[in-house]
Image (cartoon, helix red, strand yellow):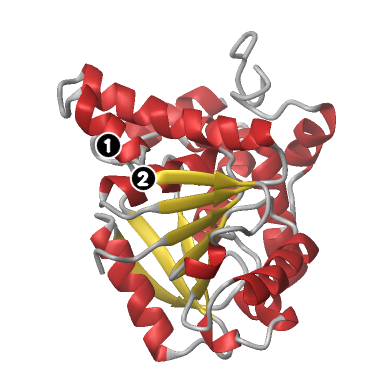
Amino acid sequence: MGDLRIGIVGAGTMGGEIAFIATQAGFPVIMKDIEQRFLDAGINKTKQIYEFKVKRRRMSPEEMDEKIRLISTTLNYDGFADADFVIEAVPENLELKQKVFAELEKACPDRAILATNTSALSITKIAEKTTCRDRVVGMHFFNPVSMMRLVEVIRGAETSDSTVDATCALAEAMGKSPVKCADSAGFIVNRLLCAAMLEAIRCESEGLLPRAEIDNALVKPDAGLPIGLFKMADQLGIDLLYKVMKILEDAFGERLAVPEIIKNLHDQGALGVKSGKGFYEYGKP
Protein backbone atom coordinates (compact mmCIF):
# COMPACT_ATOMS: atom_id res chain seq x y z
CA MET A 1 0.00 0.00 0.00
CA GLY A 2 3.04 2.26 0.30
CA ASP A 3 2.93 3.13 -3.42
CA LEU A 4 -0.65 4.38 -3.22
CA ARG A 5 -1.23 7.85 -4.68
CA ILE A 6 -4.06 9.75 -3.02
CA GLY A 7 -6.20 12.48 -4.53
CA ILE A 8 -8.06 14.98 -2.34
CA VAL A 9 -10.83 17.16 -3.77
CA GLY A 10 -11.55 20.15 -1.55
CA ALA A 11 -8.72 21.95 0.23
CA GLY A 12 -10.60 23.32 3.22
CA THR A 13 -9.87 22.45 6.83
CA MET A 14 -10.82 18.81 6.29
CA GLY A 15 -8.81 18.58 3.07
CA GLY A 16 -5.74 20.00 4.77
CA GLU A 17 -6.14 17.67 7.74
CA ILE A 18 -6.59 14.63 5.49
CA ALA A 19 -3.49 15.65 3.53
CA PHE A 20 -1.60 15.66 6.82
CA ILE A 21 -2.54 12.11 7.84
CA ALA A 22 -1.93 10.85 4.29
CA THR A 23 1.55 12.36 4.00
CA GLN A 24 2.41 11.43 7.58
CA ALA A 25 1.79 7.83 6.52
CA GLY A 26 4.10 8.38 3.54
CA PHE A 27 1.52 8.63 0.74
CA PRO A 28 1.97 11.18 -2.06
CA VAL A 29 -1.05 13.48 -2.36
CA ILE A 30 -2.51 15.60 -5.13
CA MET A 31 -4.96 18.19 -3.85
CA LYS A 32 -7.56 19.93 -6.04
CA ASP A 33 -9.76 22.96 -5.49
CA ILE A 34 -11.39 25.60 -7.66
CA GLU A 35 -9.25 28.60 -6.58
CA GLN A 36 -5.59 28.99 -5.67
CA ARG A 37 -6.46 30.68 -2.37
CA PHE A 38 -8.28 27.54 -1.25
CA LEU A 39 -5.31 25.38 -2.18
CA ASP A 40 -2.99 27.73 -0.29
CA ALA A 41 -5.26 27.49 2.77
CA GLY A 42 -5.25 23.70 2.60
CA ILE A 43 -1.46 23.53 2.38
CA ASN A 44 -1.17 26.04 5.23
CA LYS A 45 -3.45 23.88 7.38
CA THR A 46 -1.24 20.86 6.76
CA LYS A 47 1.88 22.91 7.54
CA GLN A 48 0.39 24.18 10.80
CA ILE A 49 -0.08 20.64 12.07
CA TYR A 50 3.46 19.65 11.08
CA GLU A 51 4.89 22.84 12.60
CA PHE A 52 3.20 21.95 15.88
CA LYS A 53 4.91 18.54 15.79
CA VAL A 54 8.26 20.23 15.12
CA LYS A 55 7.66 22.66 17.98
CA ARG A 56 6.95 19.72 20.29
CA ARG A 57 10.13 18.02 19.00
CA ARG A 58 8.21 15.08 17.61
CA MET A 59 9.88 15.53 14.23
CA SER A 60 12.68 17.59 12.72
CA PRO A 61 12.19 20.54 10.34
CA GLU A 62 13.84 18.42 7.64
CA GLU A 63 11.31 15.62 8.17
CA MET A 64 8.49 18.16 7.97
CA ASP A 65 9.81 19.53 4.68
CA GLU A 66 10.06 16.00 3.29
CA LYS A 67 6.40 15.34 4.16
CA ILE A 68 5.18 18.65 2.70
CA ARG A 69 6.98 17.87 -0.56
CA LEU A 70 4.68 14.86 -0.94
CA ILE A 71 1.81 17.27 -1.70
CA SER A 72 1.13 18.69 -5.16
CA THR A 73 -1.82 20.89 -6.08
CA THR A 74 -4.02 21.51 -9.11
CA LEU A 75 -6.97 23.68 -10.14
CA ASN A 76 -8.23 20.97 -12.50
CA TYR A 77 -7.92 17.21 -12.55
CA ASP A 78 -4.35 17.09 -13.86
CA GLY A 79 -2.58 14.27 -12.07
CA PHE A 80 -5.75 12.40 -11.09
CA ALA A 81 -5.14 9.93 -13.93
CA ASP A 82 -2.50 8.42 -11.62
CA ALA A 83 -4.61 8.46 -8.45
CA ASP A 84 -5.34 5.13 -6.78
CA PHE A 85 -7.65 6.45 -4.08
CA VAL A 86 -9.55 9.76 -4.03
CA ILE A 87 -11.16 11.40 -1.00
CA GLU A 88 -13.76 14.10 -1.70
CA ALA A 89 -14.08 16.80 0.97
CA VAL A 90 -16.20 19.51 -0.69
CA PRO A 91 -19.15 21.27 1.06
CA GLU A 92 -22.09 19.19 2.25
CA ASN A 93 -24.31 19.56 -0.83
CA LEU A 94 -25.67 16.52 -2.66
CA GLU A 95 -25.74 18.06 -6.16
CA LEU A 96 -22.18 19.36 -5.79
CA LYS A 97 -20.90 16.00 -4.61
CA GLN A 98 -22.69 14.19 -7.45
CA LYS A 99 -21.06 16.58 -9.93
CA VAL A 100 -17.62 15.98 -8.42
CA PHE A 101 -18.02 12.20 -8.55
CA ALA A 102 -19.15 12.28 -12.18
CA GLU A 103 -16.00 14.30 -12.96
CA LEU A 104 -13.80 11.98 -10.93
CA GLU A 105 -15.04 8.92 -12.80
CA LYS A 106 -13.80 10.50 -16.03
CA ALA A 107 -10.53 11.83 -14.60
CA CYS A 108 -9.38 8.80 -12.61
CA PRO A 109 -8.22 5.34 -13.71
CA ASP A 110 -10.63 2.41 -13.57
CA ARG A 111 -8.83 1.03 -10.52
CA ALA A 112 -9.36 4.15 -8.39
CA ILE A 113 -11.58 4.00 -5.33
CA LEU A 114 -13.71 7.14 -4.93
CA ALA A 115 -14.50 8.00 -1.32
CA THR A 116 -16.67 10.77 0.09
CA ASN A 117 -16.08 12.41 3.45
CA THR A 118 -19.77 13.34 3.74
CA SER A 119 -21.04 13.76 7.30
CA ALA A 120 -24.59 12.58 6.66
CA LEU A 121 -25.54 12.33 2.95
CA SER A 122 -26.43 9.03 1.29
CA ILE A 123 -23.48 7.27 -0.34
CA THR A 124 -25.90 5.58 -2.72
CA LYS A 125 -27.27 8.94 -3.89
CA ILE A 126 -23.80 10.46 -4.25
CA ALA A 127 -22.87 7.55 -6.53
CA GLU A 128 -26.01 7.87 -8.69
CA LYS A 129 -24.35 10.00 -11.40
CA THR A 130 -21.54 7.47 -11.90
CA THR A 131 -21.32 4.08 -13.57
CA CYS A 132 -18.61 2.85 -11.16
CA ARG A 133 -20.86 2.60 -8.12
CA ASP A 134 -19.02 -0.47 -6.86
CA ARG A 135 -15.96 1.77 -6.31
CA VAL A 136 -17.81 4.56 -4.45
CA VAL A 137 -17.65 4.45 -0.64
CA GLY A 138 -18.07 6.68 2.38
CA MET A 139 -14.93 7.50 4.38
CA HIS A 140 -16.09 9.86 7.10
CA PHE A 141 -13.28 11.44 9.12
CA PHE A 142 -13.93 13.48 12.26
CA ASN A 143 -12.54 16.94 12.92
CA PRO A 144 -9.75 17.44 13.84
CA VAL A 145 -8.66 14.55 11.62
CA SER A 146 -5.10 14.79 12.93
CA MET A 147 -6.34 13.84 16.42
CA MET A 148 -9.56 11.83 16.01
CA ARG A 149 -8.90 8.12 15.39
CA LEU A 150 -12.39 7.01 14.36
CA VAL A 151 -13.31 6.73 10.67
CA GLU A 152 -16.74 5.57 9.50
CA VAL A 153 -16.53 3.41 6.35
CA ILE A 154 -19.98 3.45 4.75
CA ARG A 155 -21.16 0.96 2.16
CA GLY A 156 -23.50 2.28 -0.54
CA ALA A 157 -26.11 0.05 -2.19
CA GLU A 158 -23.61 -1.13 -4.83
CA THR A 159 -20.28 -0.71 -3.04
CA SER A 160 -18.18 -3.85 -3.41
CA ASP A 161 -16.59 -5.84 -0.59
CA SER A 162 -13.14 -5.17 -2.04
CA THR A 163 -13.79 -1.40 -1.98
CA VAL A 164 -14.84 -1.51 1.68
CA ASP A 165 -11.85 -3.69 2.61
CA ALA A 166 -9.40 -1.41 0.78
CA THR A 167 -10.88 1.67 2.46
CA CYS A 168 -10.54 0.10 5.90
CA ALA A 169 -6.96 -0.92 5.10
CA LEU A 170 -6.10 2.64 4.06
CA ALA A 171 -7.67 4.05 7.23
CA GLU A 172 -5.54 1.70 9.31
CA ALA A 173 -2.41 2.62 7.32
CA MET A 174 -3.16 6.24 8.24
CA GLY A 175 -3.30 5.32 11.92
CA LYS A 176 -7.10 5.38 12.15
CA SER A 177 -9.68 2.96 13.55
CA PRO A 178 -12.31 2.19 10.89
CA VAL A 179 -15.83 1.08 11.72
CA LYS A 180 -18.03 -0.32 8.95
CA CYS A 181 -21.63 0.83 8.73
CA ALA A 182 -24.60 0.76 6.39
CA ASP A 183 -25.81 3.71 4.34
CA SER A 184 -28.25 5.60 6.55
CA ALA A 185 -28.67 9.35 7.04
CA GLY A 186 -26.12 10.53 9.59
CA PHE A 187 -24.56 7.05 9.78
CA ILE A 188 -23.68 6.13 13.40
CA VAL A 189 -21.86 8.94 15.15
CA ASN A 190 -23.82 11.94 13.88
CA ARG A 191 -27.16 10.27 14.59
CA LEU A 192 -26.07 9.66 18.17
CA LEU A 193 -24.49 13.10 18.60
CA CYS A 194 -27.47 14.95 17.16
CA ALA A 195 -29.89 12.97 19.31
CA ALA A 196 -27.77 13.83 22.38
CA MET A 197 -27.63 17.49 21.29
CA LEU A 198 -31.42 17.61 20.98
CA GLU A 199 -31.79 16.25 24.52
CA ALA A 200 -29.24 18.73 25.88
CA ILE A 201 -31.23 21.59 24.33
CA ARG A 202 -34.45 20.19 25.81
CA CYS A 203 -32.80 19.89 29.24
CA GLU A 204 -31.85 23.55 29.14
CA SER A 205 -35.21 24.73 27.80
CA GLU A 206 -37.05 22.76 30.50
CA GLY A 207 -34.96 24.43 33.20
CA LEU A 208 -32.95 21.42 34.39
CA LEU A 209 -29.59 23.23 34.15
CA PRO A 210 -28.00 26.10 32.19
CA ARG A 211 -25.96 24.97 29.17
CA ALA A 212 -22.59 25.62 30.82
CA GLU A 213 -23.51 23.36 33.73
CA ILE A 214 -24.81 20.68 31.35
CA ASP A 215 -21.51 20.79 29.48
CA ASN A 216 -19.57 20.68 32.75
CA ALA A 217 -21.50 17.63 33.92
CA LEU A 218 -20.76 15.78 30.67
CA VAL A 219 -16.99 16.22 30.94
CA LYS A 220 -16.66 15.19 34.57
CA PRO A 221 -14.65 11.95 35.00
CA ASP A 222 -17.74 9.84 35.56
CA ALA A 223 -19.32 11.01 32.29
CA GLY A 224 -16.15 10.94 30.28
CA LEU A 225 -16.88 13.14 27.26
CA PRO A 226 -13.84 15.17 26.14
CA ILE A 227 -15.99 18.26 25.53
CA GLY A 228 -19.55 19.35 26.37
CA LEU A 229 -22.23 19.12 23.67
CA PHE A 230 -22.87 22.87 23.38
CA LYS A 231 -19.14 23.58 23.10
CA MET A 232 -18.79 20.73 20.62
CA ALA A 233 -21.51 22.29 18.46
CA ASP A 234 -19.65 25.61 18.46
CA GLN A 235 -16.38 23.93 17.50
CA LEU A 236 -17.95 21.88 14.70
CA GLY A 237 -19.78 24.95 13.40
CA ILE A 238 -23.49 25.68 13.72
CA ASP A 239 -23.72 25.80 9.92
CA LEU A 240 -22.48 22.20 9.58
CA LEU A 241 -24.62 21.05 12.50
CA TYR A 242 -27.67 22.67 10.89
CA LYS A 243 -27.02 20.90 7.57
CA VAL A 244 -26.61 17.53 9.26
CA MET A 245 -29.72 18.04 11.37
CA LYS A 246 -31.73 19.01 8.27
CA ILE A 247 -30.66 15.76 6.59
CA LEU A 248 -31.71 13.81 9.70
CA GLU A 249 -35.03 15.66 9.89
CA ASP A 250 -35.75 14.85 6.24
CA ALA A 251 -34.92 11.18 6.87
CA PHE A 252 -36.51 10.59 10.27
CA GLY A 253 -39.09 13.32 10.70
CA GLU A 254 -40.18 14.97 13.92
CA ARG A 255 -38.07 12.87 16.30
CA LEU A 256 -34.87 14.42 14.89
CA ALA A 257 -36.29 17.79 13.80
CA VAL A 258 -33.97 20.80 13.85
CA PRO A 259 -34.58 22.70 17.12
CA GLU A 260 -35.53 26.35 16.88
CA ILE A 261 -32.39 27.56 18.66
CA ILE A 262 -30.13 25.90 16.05
CA LYS A 263 -32.13 27.44 13.21
CA ASN A 264 -32.01 30.89 14.85
CA LEU A 265 -28.24 30.76 15.47
CA HIS A 266 -27.73 29.62 11.86
CA ASP A 267 -29.91 32.38 10.43
CA GLN A 268 -28.16 35.01 12.58
CA GLY A 269 -24.72 33.91 11.41
CA ALA A 270 -23.78 32.87 14.95
CA LEU A 271 -21.84 29.84 13.75
CA GLY A 272 -19.73 29.14 16.80
CA VAL A 273 -15.98 29.55 17.19
CA LYS A 274 -15.49 30.50 13.53
CA SER A 275 -17.78 33.54 13.84
CA GLY A 276 -16.95 34.47 17.42
CA LYS A 277 -20.38 33.57 18.78
CA GLY A 278 -22.63 30.53 18.94
CA PHE A 279 -23.99 28.93 22.07
CA TYR A 280 -21.12 30.77 23.79
CA GLU A 281 -19.31 34.07 23.21
CA TYR A 282 -15.73 33.86 21.86
CA GLY A 283 -14.93 37.40 20.75
CA LYS A 284 -13.52 38.20 17.32
CA PRO A 285 -12.42 35.10 15.36
User: For the C terminus, which image quadrant?
Assistant: top right
Q: Residue at x 35, y 51 (%)?
A: 22
Secondary structure of residue under mark 1 = helix
**Disc 1 residue crowd, few under 14, some 14–19, many 20+, Cα 10 Å:** some
**Disc 2 residue crowd, few under 14, some 14–19, many 20+, Cα 10 Å:** some
Q: Quadrant of residue 274?
A: top right
Disc 1 from disc 2: Cα separation: 7 Å
Q: Residue at x 49, y 34 (%)?
A: 43
Question: Residue 122, can we see it?
Answer: no
> Which residue, given by chain and number where applicable, does mark 1 sit on?
66
* Callout 1 amino acid: Glu
From the top left corner, tell me how far across and down residue 111 is, in percent: 46, 82
Q: Is residue 241 left or right of residue 23?
A: right
From the top left corner, tell me how far across and down residue 119 is, in percent: 58, 58
User: For the N terminus, which image quadrant?
Assistant: bottom left
Viewer-nearest residue: 48 or 60: 60
Secondary structure of residue under mark 2 = loop
> Which residue, given by chain and number where applicable, does mark 2 sit on?
70
Residue 38: which numbered mark, if any?
Answer: none
In the rendered image, the vertical position of residue 170 relative to residue 174, given as above or below: below
Would you say the residues marked 1 and 2 are in contact, meaning their CB atoms lie under 8 Å apart?
yes
From the top left corner, tell me how far across and down residue 173 is, in percent: 25, 61
Viewer-nearest residue: 160 or 68: 68
